[in-house]
Each structure stands twice: as C-alpha cells, then as structure tokens.
C-alpha cells in the first residue's frame, strides 16, 4: 500500500503536467499462474488506480471495464445437424482469430456505458469480438456460427461477461475479480483496463501481461507427450503393465 | 480430491475416476473383457475429450488384462500360436486404425463414426449373446441337458486356403482367419479405445470354433499386446494418452478386476453371459438414442 501511495504521488505531477487525460495504473494479483496437479482454476484480481490531471476527479460518473484475454488461435467450428435421423457434423466455418480465453467485467452493463461504435473499436463484450470468420458469405449464417462459438465458450467458462463487478472507490481505485476455469489454455494473457466516461473510452491500458503455464510434473508430462512421444508411450505401457501385475501379485497373497 | 490431467487439460475428481475404473474392472474380471467399451463412453460423458478418453482407456485395458493373462497362462488357457497370429494382425490393425482416425478427424466425423460403430457392434454382439445365454438358462431351468455347443467353425473360415494346426485350440484352420480377425479388432482398439474382447470372444467361439477353455485366455493375450501397440500408436500420432488419467483408472480397475474374478467363480456361466449381454445391450441402446437425441452441444471446436 505504501508502495502504491509512493507511486501515486510520484506520478501525480507528471500526469498532471503532461496532458489533460487521466492515467491508469493497473495491476493484477498474479503475473503468473502455474498449473499443477491440484489446479482447479484460479481467481484473478485486476485492480489499480486512476490518476486525474491536477488530481481532480471530473464531475459525473466514470466507469471502468477490465478485460483479460488469452492468445488468439485459428479454429474450425463444426455444426451438427439432424440428417437421416441422427445428429452429425454437417456445416463448418473457420475462424482465424479466436481468443483462447476472454473475460470482461465492467462497473455497469456495457450497453449503458459505451456507444456501439466504441464497443466495436475496443472489442468490448462477447458480441463485439473480432473472430474473423472465413468462408461464409451469407451474413445470417455467419451470425449463427459466431453465436454458436460464443455460446459454446461461454458455457465452458472460457468466455465471460460480467456487469457490475468492477468496484470503483472514490472514483480513483478500482478492482474486479475474474474467474479462470481449470481448462484454461496456456499462454501469455493480456489484462486491459479501460476508463469510460460519457459513452467514450477516455484512456485504455493493456500493458499488463499474465503468463499461464504448466509447471513441475504437469509440465514434464506435457513436454514428454509432445516431444518424446516414443519414450512417453513406452512409459505409459510400462506403468500400466507394472500396476496390473502388482495388483495381481498382491491379491494372490491375500 | 481434485486432480489436473495434463494432457486432457481439465481438472477432474480423482475418486470418480478410480470408482469408474473399479466398476469397469469388476466387469472385466468377471467376463474376461477389457472393459474399454464402458470406460471410453463413461469418460466422454464425464467431460474428458473423446480422443484422450479413447487413448487412455486403451492404456488402462493393458493393465487390466495383464494379471488375467498370467492367471490363464498358469491354467494352460492361452493358445500362444493363435495369440501370436491375432497379435500380428492386431498390430497392423492399429496402424490402419491410426490412419482412419486421422482422416475422420480432419473430416470432423470421428465422433459420429465412433458412436455408430459402437451401436452396431454392441447391438449385434449383445443381441447374439443374449439369445444364446437365454437359451442355455432356459435349458438349465427345464432340467434338460444344455445343448452341446457346436464346435464347428464358420463355412467361410473353412474355405480359406493354407491350413495350420492350432493344437491348444483344437483347430485345423487357415491362419488368415485369425489374422483378419486380429486386424479388425486392432482397428477397433485404435478407434474406440476398446480391447476388443467382446468382439474377440464371440468371434473365437462362433466363427473360428475354438475350444472354450482357451478362448478367454487367448483373447486376453491378444488384448494385452494390441492395447500396448495402440497406446504406442496413440502416443506417436494423436498424442492423446493421458498417463495421469490412465494411472487413476488403473488403480480402480486392477483392484476391481481381482474382485470380479472372484465373483465370477461363484456365478453360473450362463447367467454371467446373460448379465454381460444385458450390459452390452444397455450401452448400445443408450448410444443409439444419443445419436437421435438433440445433443447438448450442437457446435464443436477444433484447433487448426
């Protein structure tokens, strides 16, 4: 806290002198999330301070939105349809940039605090994500696939949108919690904070990065399975043979 | 007790996995089948990705069958010659299965094909077994002697060229028949994560006409080696073997298998077969319904 205050005081005159826009000082509770054997997901705290020019908060309400976003990847989305009485994968669309994880929290519902143009520019909200679908020309069909993708990820806990969960204290300090499920993909995540006023984003900061990775035994297993497949397979066979033989041996003694 | 599975990338309850393995293990000990046909669907139902479920289930079947093979070997219940031919075919089968797996996965049809295969195989084999075991249960009830099993191989098998003598099985047939049988079972092992005991045992009895005293032991022998091959094949191609998942399944299933083997000694074989037939049919019906019901997830994602 002391450190915070020192930083705050140090930055104050600089920000005030330089320009008329406020400055964000964001941080997260963990810069690194390590996935180990007991990992059941994590809760991340995104918090920080808003530094106003001349130290005076503006009149009216300010809002804050925080976004945690995983690395993007290309995916194929397949859609099942009922054909000849059974459900099989029929149609599919490729998306070129789907975030592995996307969570947004805001102090009030997004539609109340930003206009649709701003939301589109900053990709605020699940329906504003730029997923770059390809192959589908028909707009209605494309929308169906986008909705399907977002819905699937939302129910898997990898896409989240929460309103009213960013707490703002005295218009200066803000904090929000985001949940991360155990199925979270590894990679480098970006935490972005946006200060919103009168429907517009005044300032945005996306300099905070979070690394999610497997460590220890989990890391070893993953690397082995990927890069030393022959050895890994032999180990799996050996382990199962030994366990099976051992159980037979023990039970014969009983 | 939550445990993170490093390959499946999900956190599961270790106790659930152990119990699941244990339940399947009891059945596998009772019937001499690996139990993969139950493990794979149950794991998928629990939320494990299908490829990981199939790959890790076949690893588990290896462990579940090893002590059974030893037990049958001691009793002279393994026809090694027949087993070797089956394994030889089986290893080629897993390689073919790996190729089929890759093609179907790129087409996005792997899940549907797996489901349909399950329904067809479990349905027909379960039906056959139910019919046969019901007849013998009825015969025992009525007091009439059980009709002697026809120890004759199928005419198709009899027509194959180049005959070998399989002494322990009491057969004089072409090795092509068990070779093809092993090959087909190998494909099934790779695609479905099953050992193939539930195909192998009836096929040995009714197609090859093997002596009943070596059927279960030889089938287990084949399962042991072919699941080892398929674990290797999965490690090299799909990279979907989750060793943590397999170990927890094994802890349950090797224990369950021993309990099952003891239970089996106290039960009449015809009731045992009827019981297995009912389980197999139930799984088949559940999967058939699953094909027709609107699935929970209409959409599925695949990384490019």
Image (cartoon, rainbow, N blue to C red):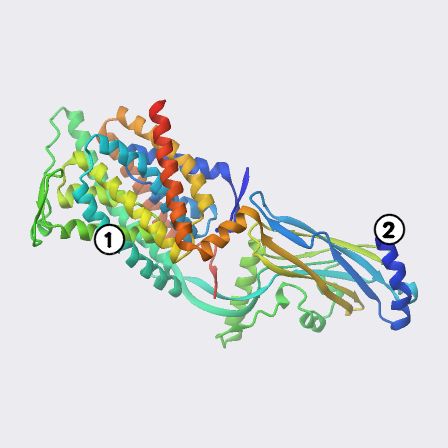
The vertical placement of A197 against B189, above or below, is below
Residue B60, percent from left and from top: 38, 42
Label 1: state its secondary structure: helix
Q: Residue B62 bears which disc, if any?
A: none
Q: Which residue is drawn at 89% across and 65% down?
A: A58
Mark 2 and mark 1 on one chain: no
For image coordinates 33% across by 61% down, the residue present is A84
Q: In this view, does B155 lie above or below A242?
A: below
Q: Residue drawn at (59%, 63%), measured in percent from left and top? A: A71
Q: Vertically, is B50 above or below B261?
A: below
> Looking at the figure, which quarter contains the N terminus of chain B?
top right
Mark 2 sits on what residue? Answer: A2
Query: Is there any visible trace of residue B256 in the rendered image?
Result: no
Q: Would residue A233 be seen by someone viewing this image from the given angle?
A: yes
Residue A86 vs residue B193, the one in the foreground: B193
Q: Residue at x 53, y 63 (%)?
A: A149
Q: Position of residue B267 (x, y in %)?
A: 26, 26
Disc number at residue B184?
1
Residue placed most toward the observer, A42 or B268: A42
Asked whether, in this view, residue A45 is left or right of residue A85, the answer is right
* x then y, percent, for residue A10: 89, 61
Chain of residue at mark 1: B
Nearer the viewer's eye, disc 2 or disc 1?
A: 2
In front of the other: A120 or B67: B67
Q: Looking at the picture, does residue B120 appear above or below residue A67?
A: above
Alpha carbons under labels 2 and 1: distance apart: 71 Å
> Which residue, as the protein is rendered here, is positioned at the far bottom?
A137
**Residue at the top extreme, as displayed:** A254
Q: State the SS at label 2.
A: helix
Q: Mark 2 lies on which chain?
A: A
């Amino acid at each position: 806290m002391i450190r915070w205050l020192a930083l705050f005081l140090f930055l104050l005159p600089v920000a005030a002198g330089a320009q008329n826009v406020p400055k964000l000082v964001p941080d997260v509770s963990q810069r690194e999330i390590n996935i180990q054997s007991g990992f059941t997901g994590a809760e991340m705290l995104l918090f920080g301070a808003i530094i106003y020019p001349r130290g005076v908060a503006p009149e009216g309400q300010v809002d804050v939105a925080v976004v945690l976003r995983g690395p993007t990847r290309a995916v194929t989305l397949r859609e099942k349809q009922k054909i000849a009485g059974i459900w099989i994968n029929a149609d599919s669309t490729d998306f070129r940039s789907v975030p592995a994880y996307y969570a947004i929290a805001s102090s009030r519902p997004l539609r109340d605090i930003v206009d649709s143009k701003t939301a589109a520019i900053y990709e605020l909200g699940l329906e504003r994500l730029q997923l770059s679908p390809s192959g589908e020309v028909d707009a209605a069909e494309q929308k169906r696939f986008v909705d399907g993708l977002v819905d699937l990820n939302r129910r898997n806990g990898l896409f989240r949108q929460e309103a009213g969960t960013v707490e703002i204290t005295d218009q200066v300090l803000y904090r929000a919690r985001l949940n991360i499920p155990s199925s979270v993909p590894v990679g480098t995540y970006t935490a972005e904070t946006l200060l919103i006023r009168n429907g517009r984003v005044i300032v945005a900061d996306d300099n905070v990065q979070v690394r999610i990775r497997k460590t220890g035994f989990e890391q070893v297993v993953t690397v082995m399975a990927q890069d030393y497949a022959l050895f890994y397979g032999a180990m799996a066979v050996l382990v199962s043979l030994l366990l099976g033989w051992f159980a037979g041996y023990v039970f014969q003694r009983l | 007790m939550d445990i993170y599975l490093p390959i499946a990338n999900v956190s599961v309850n270790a106790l659930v996995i152990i119990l699941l393995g244990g339940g399947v293990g009891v059945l596998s000990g009772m019937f001499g089948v690996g139990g993969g046909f139950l493990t794979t669907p149950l794991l998928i139902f629990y939320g494990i990705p299908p490829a990981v479920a199939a790959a890790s289930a076949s690893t588990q079947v290896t462990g579940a069958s090893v002590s059974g093979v030893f037990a049958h070997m001691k009793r002279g219940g393994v026809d090694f010659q027949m087993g070797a031919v089956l394994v030889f075919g089986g290893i080629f089968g897993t390689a073919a299965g790996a190729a089929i797996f890759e093609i179907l996965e790129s087409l996005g049809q792997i899940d549907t094909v797996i489901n349909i295969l399950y329904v067809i195989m479990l349905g027909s084999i379960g039906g056959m077994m139910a019919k046969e075991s019901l007849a013998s249960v009825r015969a025992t009830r009525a007091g009439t002697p059980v009709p002697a099993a026809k120890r004759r191989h199928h005419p198709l098998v009899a027509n194959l060229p180049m005959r070998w003598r399989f002494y322990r099985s009491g057969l004089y047939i072409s090795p092509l028949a068990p070779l093809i049988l092993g090959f087909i079972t190998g494909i099934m092992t790779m695609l479905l994560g099953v050992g193939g005991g539930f195909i192998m045992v009836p096929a040995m009895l009714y197609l090859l006409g093997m002596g009943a005293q070596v059927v279960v032991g030889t089938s287990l022998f084949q399962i042991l080696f072919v699941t080892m091959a398929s674990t290797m094949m999965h490690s090299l191609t799909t990279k979907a073997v989750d060793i943590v998942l397999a170990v927890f399944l094994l802890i349950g299933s090797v224990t369950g298998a021993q309990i099952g083997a003891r239970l089996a000694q106290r039960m009449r074989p015809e009731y045992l077969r009827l019981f297995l037939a009912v389980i197999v049919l139930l799984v088949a019906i559940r999967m058939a319904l699953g094909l027709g019901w609107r699935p929970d997830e209409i959409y599925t994602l695949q990384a490019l």
